[in-house]
Image: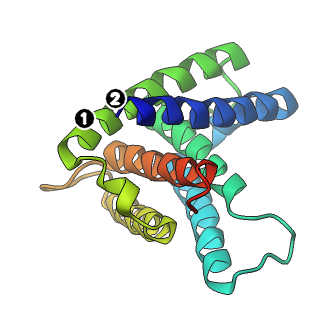
Amino acid sequence: MSNTNIQYDEVIAQCREMFIFKMGDYGPNWRILRPETLTDQILIKAKRIRTLEINGESKVGEDIWPEFIGIINYGVMALIQLEKGYADDIDISSEKALELYDQYIESTKNLMIAKNTDYGEAWRLMRVQSYTDLIISKLQRIKAIENNGGKTLVSEGIDANIQDIINYSVFALIKHNEGKA
């Protein structure tokens, strides 16, 4: 498990760096996006990953790994938007956005640690394609919950599904970094 924690942090450091670079270019302009828009953006990335997995080639010359980074970063943005709501204008500094990023990643990692303990690192036995399918399935769940005004009867909420999506994406990148994907 300690190796998983280190690998998790290495993947997140890479994602965080991309988040910082993007904010350097655009600032936290994502604050204007409604949560549903972020759900759709994550879905676009997941569908591209699945298409590339099935077709085996990219017409634009980019493989699937940057898409998993994008899913993680859009997932964090979605968690922030769920709590704070969207804004009509950029209403936070890049520094505050990064502080929120770290906060939501910490809670998402804590969820991974708890589930990983219960499931005995079963994710290591899975194929990356299974993560992709599970991400798409979770996105369909999120869309159904969003279409139902955010209400569920017995199921996890949107935030828990997004955290699972982030964690599946981290697992895919860990496998990639290990040369097992």
The amino acid type of the residue labelled 1 equals Ala
Q: Give percent across and percent down for residue 67.
A: 67, 57
- Which dot marks residue 139? none
- Which dot marks residue 110? 2
Q: Is residue 60 above or below residue 84?
A: below
Q: Quadrant of residue 155?
A: bottom left
- Which dot marks residue 114? 1
Q: Quadrant of residue 114?
A: top left
Pick the front one: 64 or 147: 64
Q: Give percent across and percent down for residue 177.
A: 62, 48
Q: Residue at x 58, y 63 (%)?
A: 181
Is 33 left or right of 79, judged from the image as shown?
right
Q: Residue furthest left?
A: 154
The amino acid type of the residue labelled 2 equals Asn
- Element under disc 1: helix
Q: Is residue 33 above or below residue 3?
A: below
Pick the front one: 122 or 62: 122
Q: Residue furthest bottom?
A: 55
Is 114 left or right of 128, judged from the image as shown?
left
For the residues labelled 2 and 1, the Cα–Cα distance comes to: 6 Å
Do the residues bearing badges 2 and 1 touch, measured as CB atoms within 8 Å? yes
Q: Give percent across and percent down for residue 25.
A: 87, 33
